[in-house]
């Protein structure tokens, strides 16, 4: 469901008296509101704190008149006028001027109002908007006489179709003097005493959808949930128990046995395979002996001389 918000375009512009005179003149700044369909008027009690040389608090029952437009459209500006009328009749206590105000274009009375704006069907936090009114007194205002209050105007922009409500709240009265400095001086700050009276003075109006608003709402894509990573268990280190043991070397003596091979070592085939070196030695020996014997025989047969 679209959130219902009302945006205020009311601006708090308090310039020098020359700028205000050029912009406002001697009339009331209304800003060209549309045709008015209904007017809501109710008495609301305010507690006003004055400033200056003799500060104090007084109670006044103002008659508030708020107007609403014939029609309001989503996204289009809506102008609302807000009148604050001084108490009248027997026993009425009007809000007095703290000093004399001559009827000149250079003297300006500035009235600022705060209104609480809400919207339905969606309940949203209240939005405080500001209304502003500036005017020069039409006649001379004596000190302590009833102070003429200008009509205020505020502009809101509905952002969704439905029903809007505007309830009046705090008031601030300022005056731009003819003497230097020409900045606005706050004379009164007034707050609502009885909330039910302000509720009775509230206005409500319907807001229709804009022409470009589609009858079929565009579905809002559902965000894909991001998987939550599963935490990996971290192994818990265990305490290592180290055991030291001293070992003394004490070898057991072993018996050493030496065996002589029987009938000689088997180093080869020998005579069983073929003639070996002994045969050649024997043959050589026989040849030497035979040669020696042959030499002796031949020496014995040699003829003797003479």
Image: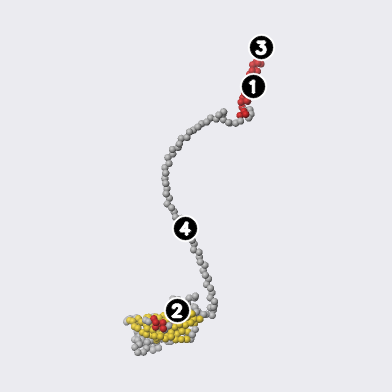
* Nearest the eye: 77 or 182: 77
The answer to whether any part of residue 245 appears in the image is yes
Badge 1 marks a residue whose secondary structure is: helix
Determine the residue positioned at 35% across, 81% down. Answer: 49
- Within 10 Å of the Cα at label 3, are there few (<14), some (14-19), or many (20+) other Cα atoms? few
Query: Residue 75 location, x and y as percent?
Result: 50, 79
Reply above or below: 153 against 222. below
Q: Quick one: label 3 or label 1, which is nearer the N terminus?
A: 1
| The image quarter in which residue 237 lies | bottom left
Residue 118: which disc? 2
Distance Cα–Cα, label 2 vs label 4:
53 Å
Distance Cα–Cα, label 3 vs label 1:
29 Å
Disc 1 vs disc 2: which is toward the camera? Answer: 2
Residue 304: which disc? 3
Distance Cα–Cα, label 1 vs label 4:
100 Å
The residue under label 1 is 287
Determine the residue positioned at 42% across, 42% down. Answer: 246
Do callouts 1 and 4 mark residues in contact (Cβ within 8 Å)?
no
State left or right for residue 289 relative to residue 136: right
Disc 2 vs disc 4: which is toward the camera? Answer: 4
Badge 2 marks a residue whose secondary structure is: strand
Q: Quadrant of the C terminus?
A: top right
The residue under label 4 is 233
């Amino acid at each position: 469901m679209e959130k219902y918000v009302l945006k205020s375009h009311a601006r708090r512009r308090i310039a020098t008296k020359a700028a205000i005179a050029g912009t406002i003149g001697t009339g009331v700044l209304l800003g060209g509101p549309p045709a008015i369909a209904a007017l809501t008027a109710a008495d609301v009690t305010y507690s006003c704190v004055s400033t200056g040389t003799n500060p104090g608090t007084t109670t006044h029952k103002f008659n508030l008149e708020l107007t609403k437009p014939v029609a309001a459209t989503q996204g289009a500006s809506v102008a609302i006028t807000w009148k604050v009328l001084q108490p009248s009749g027997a026993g009425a206590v009007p809000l007095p001027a703290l000093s004399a105000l001559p009827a000149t274009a250079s003297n300006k009375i500035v009235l600022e109002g705060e209104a609480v704006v809400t919207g339905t069907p969606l309940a949203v936090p209240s939005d405080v908007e500001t209304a502003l009114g500036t005017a020069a007194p039409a006649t001379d205002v004596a000190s302590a006489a009833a102070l003429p209050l200008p009509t205020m105007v505020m502009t809101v922009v509905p952002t969704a179709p439905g029903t809007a409500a505007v309830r009046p709240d705090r008031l601030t009265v300022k005056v731009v003097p003819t003497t230097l400095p020409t900045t606005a001086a706050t004379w009164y700050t007034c707050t609502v005493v009885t909330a039910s009276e302000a509720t009775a003075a509230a206005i409500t109006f319907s807001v229709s959808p804009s022409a470009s608003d589609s009858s079929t709402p565009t579905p809002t894509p559902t965000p894909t949930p991001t998987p939550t990573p599963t935490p990996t268990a971290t192994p818990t280190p265990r305490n290592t128990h180290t055991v030291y043991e001293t070992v003394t070397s004490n070898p057991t003596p072993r018996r050493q046995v030496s065996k002589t091979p029987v009938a000689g070592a088997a180093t080869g085939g020998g005579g069983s395979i073929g003639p070996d070196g002994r045969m050649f030695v024997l043959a050589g020996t026989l040849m030497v002996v035979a040669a020696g014997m042959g030499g002796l025989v031949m020496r014995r047969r040699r003829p003797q001389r003479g």
